[in-house]
Image (spheres, grey):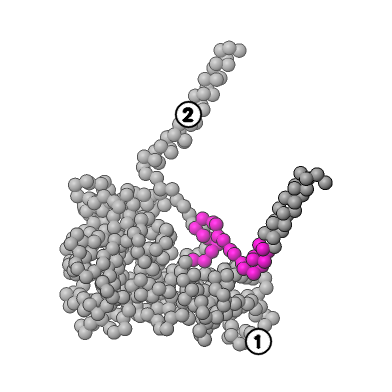
Amino acid sequence: MKPRNLVSSVHLAALLSFAFLIALFSYLIFRTYHFRFDLSEGKVYGLAPQTIQVLQALKSEPIDVYAFFQEDSAFKEPLENLLKEYAYRHPKFHYAFYDPDRMPGKVKQYQIDAYETIVIEAKGKREKTKQPTEEAITNALAKLFRQESKTINFASGYGNPSIHDEETKTAYGLFHKKLVEANYKVNEITIPRGGIPPRTDLLVFGGPRVDLLPEELKSIREYLSKDGNVMILIDPVDSGQGKNLEQFLLEYGVQLGSDVIVDKLSKLFGADFLIPLVTEYKPHVITQGFRLASFFPVARSVRKTKNAPPGFKISEIAWTGAGSWAETNLKNLSEGNVEFDAQTDQPGPVPMVVAVQKNGTKGGRMIVIGDSDFANNAYLNLSGNKDLVLNSVAWLTGDEFAVSIRPRSREATPLYLKETDQQFLFYVPVLGFPFVFLAAGTGVFFWRRQFH
């Protein structure tokens, strides 16, 4: 054999040996370790960050999930794919499917009373859910992790919506239901003279229609000084109303605007211009990883005061778009005159949500939102509304596992256009191009008639 051929053969043998070793190494690695990647936009095939957070908190605990589904159930395969994601993220996560018709012993053991029931066990405790969704399973795991439930008290007696009505559009029944599903204890209370009841982890004022009395504000002030937490959802009001509450909030560096926010961009979504669209979120625990827009029907501005009081961290965390403004002439607005006045109106972006936290403590927190309707039955499940209000509750109560998890679905990515952009898209592609082709065709037609 010639030397050149011998060298080529050696190189070929070395290359094949190297390729064989790489293939063998890859086979052994991937047989032992499993890697899953979600390259889709929005990570629609992976678990939500909140779910991963809960699984990490339970990483040393065995988790067993038993799904009682019939063999031909349409929900069985999607649920199995979901549970595989959980098992991939948690080394001690185990799941099994049982057909209730074929496994009566298991049905009796776990006290199953309906098809499509999921049993979750961890830390010696058990939870059940009939919703085969990531949100339901993760919230069940969070319940097993918590030592005790947080107590949320809604202040009543101010003309605010009911928390027990799930049918009326303006009520808070669905909001109440979501809080209970997240393992909160939810009550309605009237503020007594003796102060806020003990063991109140969060006090909520949802859409008060009358002003608070000085004695009531004194009780709230004392409650906050003892590291209590308050959520205030406050709508626009006529001049002269709500002055006590406005002065109270100024003590904590929060200013309520005597205005109504106008946002003509909302028309692109089929909404009224008095339903501002919030798309800009500032860095905060509440808005971490938040990308969905939120809708606020008839809202007012909420701002951080210029001279913030010492001892508090005050953050404006949610803003409307640049095309919005805070309309101060409420009389003209009621008559349908909606035009921006540079002399009196505040141009967008307009802040709508302010978070307040006392320095050096885990309590003493407050959220003020310039609208109450966004959390009612009609709007709670619209876009990012539910996530925003539940994340706010979780931050206020210091409950990192009170999560709000969006379903794993492809999110819409709307294109926001200014009025000039809309006019361009109408006149150029819709009118301009057809006119150009019509003119060119007409010219060619007469040119051919002239020379033929």
Query: Residue 169: x, y in percent?
Result: 39, 66
Query: Residue 236: x, y in percent?
Result: 26, 61
Amino acid residing under circle 2: Phe
Magenta-colored segment: predominant secondary structure: loop
For the point 45% across and 51% down, which residue is it? 414
Magenta-colored stretch includes residue 376? no
For the point 58% across and 63% down, which residue is it? 36
Closer to the camera in the image, 121 or 60: 60
Which residues lie in the magenta part? 25-48
Residue 215 drawn above or below residue 39: below
Query: Residue 233: x, y in percent?
Result: 30, 67
Picture quadrant where residue 353 is located? bottom left
Query: Residue beneath label 2, please?
Result: 435
Distance in Å between CA atoms under marks 2 and 1: 75 Å
Return the residue found at the far right. 1
Amino acid residing under circle 1: Gly
Residue 286 drawn above or below residue 428: below
Of mark 2 and mark 1, the one earlier in the sequence is 1
Q: Nearer the viewer, mark 2 or mark 1?
A: 1
User: Which mark is drawn over residue 105?
Assistant: 1
For the point 16% across and 75% down, which residue is it? 214
**In-image side of 316 versus 73 (left or right):** left
